[in-house]
């Protein structure tokens, strides 16, 4: 084999997956047809779970600096709008946690005691980071880990059998054990492999762009619903979005011209702006589809290759990063002989429901943006709910994917959820112990039985004994490499070590030195 895995697509999802595979010891090549990071405007924010992923791999300082620069740009935009006064910037930007169909969600109305909304540690402070910045960050990380990233190389075909995949590229053939398509919504890997891709057809046309224009003084900052659609202005100079409900574009690949953007922005906003230059622009729809399974033999899919939907809410980038985090350690374990191939079945069973849920939520946002009287009545109801603690908390948890819980064995409330970023007595936090991409048994009551079980997995599972004053009810937590809780137990409760033994074997195979039948 030339490599253990070939990853088609070198965007954030492909690079995240490649990094996770390298942490697990796999030899990885990434094929990316573009020679540079695509400058076209895309996602401008990430959800808390994505920030958690990068935090757990030691990239929080870089994210914090990227966000600081983003807020500087936002404040410059507000100063420009306010004639040099940037005093309202914080109130107009930092006081919200996101939006549902352009309905802003106030940070002060979020109940942080809800699971996933108040226990992410410093990652919860990160949101305003662009897709291009994430891609550059992960590109540097991939270089550090020794991933072979081949830019300017395009996958043209492949042949897969029971033992390997021969990948044909614009620069020759590569033989690998596995192929993962992270090559976007028009994935060549998905099409060539014959994955079923059911879903709903588009009904809207959207444009997002950064432009030079005059006459923008009367555009409202943020999201605005009008009688002809929805538009957004900001949070950076010249950034505009238009949403129109007159069907999909006749030619989605046609160039986005200043004249076309100007006409659309005038039509939706009612403001006679004049666009003099388009710096970057993209066109998208609410096309929503998802493959029925994420794996066919030795070919797997992640990110937009597996699911497409409208870009509202920046959920697509975060959904794809979650796919990569879930798949990476599992595929690396199978390649390294640390787990049976059946472990890969849990990739589809865990991530497919999350993707389906995101697709439905993006559909619901389109419904709340339509300009017809029925949809506008619905929008008013959602707006009222967003002015309550219960409503904002619910919407924030769903949009932030904080409510994700995998169906894992065990009754403990943490099981199947992203593990809280526990603050430990030695001054460290949980994320500090996950940088290497290994599983962790966190023993919070100095229990020799827990540690004895984990000792049989010393090459696969780290063990840490510490205290956690903020969560005195916890006795121990088994954290998977992706940061999700595989098993947990409370202090003072009747605790059977059988649950821990079963979880260890379920996710990390038989103990070292154990004799297996046959």
Image: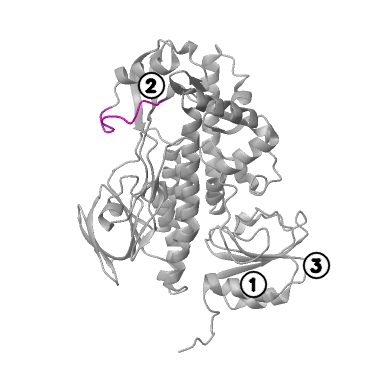
**Disc 2 versus disc 3: distance between alpha carbons?**
61 Å
Report which residue position mark 1 lands on.
500
Mark 1–mark 2 Cα distance, whole angstroms, equals 56 Å
Q: Is residue 314 visible?
A: no
User: Which quarter of the picture shows residue 407?
Assistant: bottom right
Q: Position of residue 58 (x, y in %)?
A: 55, 52
Q: Secondary structure at mark 2?
A: strand
Residue bearing the label numbered 3: 492
Q: Is residue 362 visible?
A: yes
Residue at image coords 63%, 24%: 91
| Colour scheme | one colour
508 lies above or below 286: below
Of 209 and 10, nearer the camera is 209
Please, what is the dominant secondary structure of the magenta stretch?
loop
The residue positioned 75% from the left and 56% from the top of the image is: 471
Describe the element under mark 3 as helix, strand or loop: loop
Residue depicted at 58% across the width and 55% down the height: 405
User: Could you say which quadrant of the image residue 132 lies in?
Assistant: top left
Quadrant of image for the N terminus: bottom left
CB atoms of marks 2 and 3 within 8 Å: no
On whether residue 247 falls in the magenta region, the answer is: yes
Q: Mark 2 or mark 3: which comes first in sequence?
A: 2
């Amino acid at each position: 084999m030339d490599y253990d895995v070939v990853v088609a697509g070198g965007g954030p999802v492909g690079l995240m997956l490649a990094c996770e595979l390298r942490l697990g010891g796999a030899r990885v090549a990434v094929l990316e047809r573009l020679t540079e990071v695509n400058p076209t405007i895309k996602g401008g924010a990430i959800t808390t779970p994505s920030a958690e992923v990068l935090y757990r791999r030691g990239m929080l300082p870089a994210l914090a600096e990227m966000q600081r620069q983003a807020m500087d740009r936002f404040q410059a935009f507000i100063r420009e709008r306010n004639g040099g006064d940037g005093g309202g910037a914080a109130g107009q930007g930092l006081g919200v946690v996101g939006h549902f169909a352009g309905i802003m969600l106030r940070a002060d109305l979020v109940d942080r005691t809800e699971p996933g909304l108040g226990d992410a540690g410093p990652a919860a402070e990160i949101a305003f980071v662009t897709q291009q910045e994430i891609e550059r960050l992960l590109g540097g990380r991939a270089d550090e880990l020794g991933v072979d990233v081949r830019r300017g190389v395009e996958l043209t075909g492949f042949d897969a059998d029971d033992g390997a995949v021969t990948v044909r590229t614009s620069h020759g053939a590569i033989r690998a054990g596995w192929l993962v398509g992270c090559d976007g919504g028009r994935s060549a890997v998905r099409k060539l492999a014959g994955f079923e891709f059911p879903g709903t057809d588009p009904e809207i046309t959207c444009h997002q762009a950064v432009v030079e224009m005059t006459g923008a003084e009367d555009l409202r900052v943020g999201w605005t619903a009008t009688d002809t659609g929805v538009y957004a202005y900001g949070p950076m100079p010249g950034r505009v979005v238009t949403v129109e409900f007159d069907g999909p574009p006749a030619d989605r690949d046609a160039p986005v011209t200043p004249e076309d953007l100007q006409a659309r922005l005038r039509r939706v906003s009612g403001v006679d702006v004049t666009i003099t230059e388009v710096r970057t622009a993209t066109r998208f729809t609410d096309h929503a589809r998802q493959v029925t399974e994420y794996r066919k033999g030795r070919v797997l899919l992640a990110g937009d290759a597996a699911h497409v939907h409208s870009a509202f809410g920046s959920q697509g980038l975060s959904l794809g990063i979650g796919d990569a985090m879930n798949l990476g350690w599992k595929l690396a374990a199978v390649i390294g002989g640390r787990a049976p191939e059946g472990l890969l079945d849990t990739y589809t069973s865990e991530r497919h429901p999350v993707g389906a849920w995101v697709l439905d939520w993006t559909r619901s946002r389109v419904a709340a943006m339509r300009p017809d009287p029925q949809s506008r009545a619905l929008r008013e109801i959602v707006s009222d709910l967003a002015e309550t603690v219960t409503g904002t908390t619910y919407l924030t948890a769903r949009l932030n994917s904080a409510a994700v819980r995998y169906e894992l064995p065990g009754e403990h409330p943490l099981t199947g959820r992203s593990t809280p970023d526990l603050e430990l007595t030695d001054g460290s936090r949980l994320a500090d112990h996950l940088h290497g991409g290994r599983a962790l048994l966190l023993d919070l009551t100095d229990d020799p039985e827990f540690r004895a079980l984990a000792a049989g997995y010393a090459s696969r599972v780290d063990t840490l004994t510490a205290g956690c004053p903020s969560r005195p009810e916890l006795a121990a937590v088994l954290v998977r490499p992706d940061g999700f809780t595989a098993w947990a137990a409370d202090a003072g409760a009747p605790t059977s070590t059988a649950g821990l033994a079963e979880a260890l074997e379920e996710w990390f195979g038989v103990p070292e030195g154990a004799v297996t039948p046959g």
